[in-house]
Amino acid sequence: MFKLNSVTISGKEILPIIEGGKGIAVSNGQSSGSWANGNGLGTFSAVNADSYDDEGHLITTVYKGKTRRERHDELIASAISGGITQAKIAHEMSNGNGLINMNVLWEMGAVEPILHGVLEKVSPLINGVTCGAGMPYKLAEICVQYKKYYFPIVSSGRAFNILWKRAYNKFAEFLGGVVYEDPWLAGGHNGLSNSEDPLKPLPPYDRVKALRAVMRECGIPDTTPIIMAGGVWWLSEWADWLDNLDLGSIAFQFGTRPLLTQESPISDRWKKRLLTLQEGDIALNRFSPTGFYSSAVRNNFIQNLDARSNRQVAYSSSPMGDHVESFAVGARGRAVYLTTTDKIHVQEWVNAGFTQAMRTPESTLVFVTPSEENEILMDQINCMGCLSQCKFSNWAQNEHGTTGKKADPRSFCIQKTLQAISHSDETENQLMFSGHQAYRFAKDPFYKDGFIPTAKQLVERIQTGY
């Protein structure tokens, strides 16, 4: 018989079962509050969360600002309003059970004012803040101001050690837990370092054991849980992690499985698509405008980005070495120089309709159709600064409002596509983040005949080990 003991998180004894936060309205107050109601820890996303009018209808943010900076300010106001709204819903849905955390990304635009804006209004309704996607040095300092626990997301013991020595050691009392997000298994953005091979995953056990060793060196008690995130499906497969002296207190985060619940806000089409995924349909890619690797379903959206990147050649602005073939670029027909072999490829792409050459920051050209070029340029123009810095639009959250680099047409507007997939039935032509275990929906007998459980039923099922 599988046995799952409770753990103490944020000063409260709950099940060691965490709902992972998923941005742009995918983890909302309803899903996280329902999860907490089952005595787990529910996590709603404050990354551009949804707001509603007095009649319960979604408020769509329409950006009126003429400049990126003006639209950025509108985005901040909308994000704060949405975070407050979802915190209230989560609190109500939890019925006082379990715990509620708010999730933010450190690399999202204006994360600090958004954190303050939400916590100033609803800090009594939540228990903590979970934060990753970068090195959130100021996370602890901000959370402690509101007496909230903080949960940094890291992908190695080394990353946590840097955070601890630089900032967290001053706020040890409010460290609620450390989320280890496996860079080869988790969905969404992943923390692969430059020294790690995306095609050669390392065992999570050894990495978590090393993280606990670092935490012990920092004087952090074993009762402070490490939350394993990424690749967790059946807890029976992780039985050797439970009551393990090498690992200390352990909890498990589920990001993908909560997508397929009745309370999950994603569309019915998205839910049905999850039930059809096969092994190999989810893969790491590096198209994100954040510059991070990310894990997503290889649908038309990703395949088109793959194809666009493959239609790419290096150029020089004057004849140099093998770059001797002249090619006219842009409306003014300015000449650049290609190799003879690349000129042949370019002519094939042009003949196939990919007539527009777009420059990248790395002195290459990518070839797209006229309609693709127009969409890319419009998306770059309409940037609202949803990231702290964006390689697609070249926005940066600094006094200059730019990264100083050329906008990169090989990437995409992440705000646009995540809003689209979260609020429509379109799944093939939008970015669909996913954990690498999502193909198991189709094989797991719990979901036989398309069964979609409530959050309560899923939490109960997970407690059995399956």
Image (tube, rainbow, N blue to C red):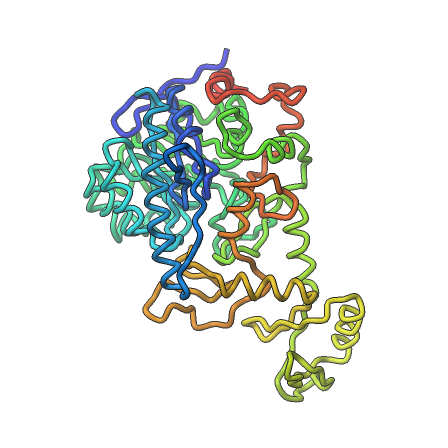
Q: Decide if residue 236 is on the left or right side of residue 62.
A: right
Residue at 48 percent of width and 25 percent of height: 240
Residue 243, picture quadrant: top left
Q: Quadrant of residue 362?
A: bottom right
Foreground: 246 or 362?
362
> Against 93, is 341 above or below?
below
Left or right: residue 335 compared with residue 147: right
Q: Position of residue 128 (x, y in %)?
A: 30, 35
Q: As rendered, which of 368 and 242 lies closer to the eye? A: 368
Residue at position x 55%, y 66% from top? Answer: 408
Up/down of 317 relative to 445, above or below: below
Q: Residue at x 34, y 54 (%)?
A: 110
How many labels, in total? 0
Q: Tell me where residue 134 appears, x and y as whole percent.
A: 39, 52
> Residue at the location (67% across, 55% down)?
304
360 or 159, which lies in front? 360
Farthest-out residue, front? 55
Residue 4 in the image: state x and y as whole percent: 43, 18
The residue at the far bottom in this view is 319
Specify the quadrant that holds the C terminus: top right
Residue 321 against residue 166 in the figure, above or below: below
- The picture places residue 340, in percent across and down from the top left corner, at 77, 80
